[in-house]
Image (cartoon, rainbow, N blue to C red):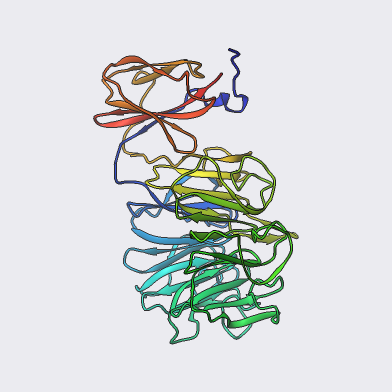
Amino acid sequence: MKRSLISIITCLLLIWVNVKFTAQLNWKNVYAGTEFSMALKSDSTLWSWGFNGNGQLGLGHKNLSNVPAQINSSIKWIGADVGAIHAAAIAGDGSLWSWGLNGNGQLGLGNTTEYSSPQKLGTDTDWAQITAGQVHCLALKQDSSLWAWGYNGTGAAGIETPSDVFSPVEIIPGTKWLTASAGGYHSLGVDEYGNLWAWGDNGTFQLGNPSLSQSFIPTLISDSGDWVEVSAGFQYSLAMKSDSTIWSWGFNGNGQLGQGTNSLVKSPAKIGEFHDWVKIYAGASFSFGIRKDGSVWGWGFNSFGQLGTGDITQKTSPVLIQGIENVVAIAPAKGLYYGGSVYGIHTLMLTEHAESICVAGSNYTGQLGTGNTGGNIYNFECSVGMITDVQNPVLTEENVIVFPNPVFDLLRYRCNSVPLGFEVYDFHGNLIRKEKMPEMIGAIDFSDIPEGIYLTKFTFSDGMVIKKVIKTE
C-alpha cells in the first residue's frame, strides 16, 4: 500500500498538550464577531481570541490573540454576545458589561470612548439577555422589558429620534418581549403573545414589510401569535414558528435565505418542508439551523469554507454538514460593511458536552483560535480551546512519547507511569476508539483508521495528555 503524507500538517508532528480531566467542565456557548471570537465555559469564565485593534477581546490591551485568552478572571459570566467590533456580557449578579469599539455609543456607557477591558453599564442588576448587532445592542431585563442603544441612523435602536443612543433606553415601555435579535442595521423582536416585530433599515426588505423604507420604531410584521425565535443577519432575517418551521426574508445575493434562489424576498417565506427545527443562526451572509436530531444544516456565502462543507460553493438551500453530530450551539460571524463589502467569514460550533470548539472558515486574523494566523478551514475542526487546567505544567517528552508520527499502522507509545486508558478522536470531535491501557509501553492499532488528523488522549490518575497524530496511507 502506498504511503503518503498530508503536506499541510507536517508541522504538527510534535505538539504536546497537558490537560487535567474535569468531567463537568465544558464549553457552554460561542459568539463570533466580524474578525474575532468569544466563548463561555461552564465554570462561568469568558474567553476571546482574534483581531483586537479596538480592544474587542476585552483583555486590557489591543494585541491580537490567536488562541483563547481569559477575560477578567475576577468576574463570573452567565451570558454574552458580540457585535462586529464590540462585545457585551452579563455577570452572575445580573450586571451588564461592554467593551470594544464605541463610535456610535454601542457600548451603552454614555460616551463614545473605546475600551479594551469590560466596563459596567450603570448600576442595574436585572439584565437577562444581550444581543449585539454591527453597531448597536438590544437587551432584555428580567421583567421582559427590552432596551436598546448604539447606532440609530436608520432606526436600529428602535428610538423615534434618528440619532445615536449612548445609554440604554426602553423600547415601547410596558411591552413584554420573549426574545430579540440585533442585526446589521435592523432589529427583530417577538412579544409575549408570539407576534413578530421589526425596526431599522429596510433597504433590502429585511424588515419583512415591503411598504417601508425604514422604521424608527418597532413595526408589527405578523400578529399570528406563533413566532418563537428570531435571528437578524446583515440585511436579512430568519425566524422560527412554534410548529418548528423556519422562515426568511431580505437580501439574498449569496443564498443566505435558503430559498433555493438568489432573489430578494420581501416578506417572511418558509424554508423547505422540515418541521423539526430547534435553532436558527443568521450571520454576515450565511446561515445555519439545527434540527431536533442534533444535525446541523448550512446555507449562503461559502467562499472561505465558513459553512464547513469541505468546498467553497455557496448554497442556496440548506445542506447537511457532514461529520458533525449532536450540535448544540453555532456562531456564524457577524457582518461588518466596509469599502463596499460585507466582512464576517468564519464560524464557531459546539457539540454536546464540548471539551473543545469546532471551527471553520477564514483565519486571517487568528479568529479561529488555532494558534496561528492565515489560511482557511473548509471542514469543521474540533480542536480549538481543548479544556485544560493551566495550573498543571506541560509534560516533557520524557513523560509520554508516541511514534512514529505520522503513523501508518501501529502507533507506539511510552509513558513514565501506567495510563488508565486512551481515546482517539477525529478533528470533528467524534470518538473513534476507546480502550484500557494497563502497560507503560505498548502500541495502538491505527491500521483501520482513515487518513487524517486525530487527537489521542492518554488518561492518567491525575490528568491526561493529548497528542495530535497524523494517520497516513
Q: Quadrant of the C terminus?
A: top right
Residue 192 in view, yes or no = yes
Q: Residue at left 49%, top 35%? A: 427
* Residue 165 higher or lower than 334, as above or below: below
* Viewer-closest of 460 and 392: 460
Left/right placement of residue 251 relative to residue 71 reads right
- Total numbered circles: 0
Residue 75: image quadrant is bottom left
* Residue 55 higher or lower than 189, as above or below: above
* Viewer-closest of 336 and 215: 215
Residue 118: image quadrant is bottom left
Q: Position of residue 60 (x, y in %)?
A: 47, 54
Q: Residue at left 32%, top 63%? A: 92
Residue 429: image quadrant is top left
Q: Quadrant of the N terminus?
A: top right
Q: Position of residue 439 (x, y in %)?
A: 28, 16
Q: Position of residue 374 (x, y in %)?
A: 63, 39
Q: Residue at left 42%, top 18%? A: 445
* Residue 338 higher or lower than 125, as above or below: above
* Viewer-closest of 456 and 65: 456
Q: Residue at left 40%, top 47%? A: 352
Left/right placement of residue 97 relative to residue 224 reads left
Residue 57 in view, yes or no = no
* Residue 432 higher or lower than 378, as above or below: above
